[in-house]
Amino acid sequence: MAPRNSINLNVILQAATEIVDTGGVEELSITSLAQKLDIRSPSLYNHFNGLQGIRKLLSVYGLEQLLNVLMRAAIGRSGDDAIREMAKAYVAFARSHPGLYEVTLLAPGPQDPEVQEVGQEIVDLVTQVLKVYQLEEMDAIHMARALRSILHGFASLEQKGGFGLPFDLDISLQTIIDTFLDGLHVRLSNTAH
């Protein structure tokens, strides 16, 4: 347990992440967080405003962590290679932080400025990677949404045990991403004519 004098927001967010990753989002409460940190519950209110406050902070923290993972995957890569690596990194993040990933989906609302800022950074990263395909801005947004839908769907189905057949999930993910990329290339060749 953390010594009392080392309690700061980062320590709190790490403890909250451990709670949601091991027990699920519903296990996060002011009481469970205070117990994990070995402090009294009222002390937490110096750092955030109630359960909704910590969930919002954790959601933004999760989005920031996801952004960092995606950026590291994209560095030094472009085109298909960048998309493949980002896809693997996205799913790996959801696997290693199932609760934190879920909290990112329970963001306080798309109108929240902090959520908008980090969410926009993720969209900007993906659309930057898609620039190599010379897509119009609107098409790049549609392709970013398609990729997110694929990755979220895969990660969610995997977390909920939706893939019951005994086949390698990483090969399934690779096949899905390759199919997405094949479709992207066909779409590009059709618009070039």
Image: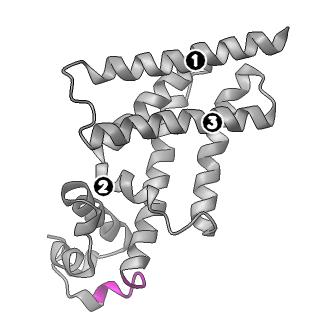
Disc 3 is placed on an element classified as helix
Q: Residues within 10 Å of mark 2 (few under 14, many from 20)?
A: many
Label 1 or label 3, whichever comes before in sequence order: 3
The answer to which quarter of the image holds residue 133 is top right
Which three-letter amino acid code belongs to the residue tagged 2? Gly
Disc 1 is placed on an element classified as helix
What residue is pinned by disc 1?
181
Which three-letter amino acid code belongs to the residue tagged 3? Ala
Label 2 or label 3, whichever comes before in sequence order: 2
Residue at point 57%, 22% (across, down) = 77
Contact (Cβ within 8 Å) of mark 1 with mark 3: no
What residue is pinned by disc 3?
144
As measured in the structure, the alpha-carbon distance from the residue carrying label 2 to the one carrying label 3 is 24 Å
In the image, is 56 to the left or to the right of 18? right
Q: Is residue 166 above or below residue 14?
A: above
Q: Is residue 42 above or below residue 85?
A: below
Residue at point 53%, 38% (across, down) = 148
Label of residue 99 in the image: 2
| Residue 40, horizontal then vertical, whole percent | 20, 88
Residue at point 77%, 11% (across, down) = 190
As measured in the structure, the alpha-carbon distance from the residue carrying label 1 to the one carrying label 3 is 12 Å
Q: Residues within 10 Å of mark 3 (few under 14, many from 20)?
A: many
| Residue 175, horizontal then vertical, whole percent | 42, 16
Residue at point 59%, 45% (across, down) = 122
Coloring basis for residues: one colour
| Residue 132, horizontal then vertical, whole percent | 71, 21
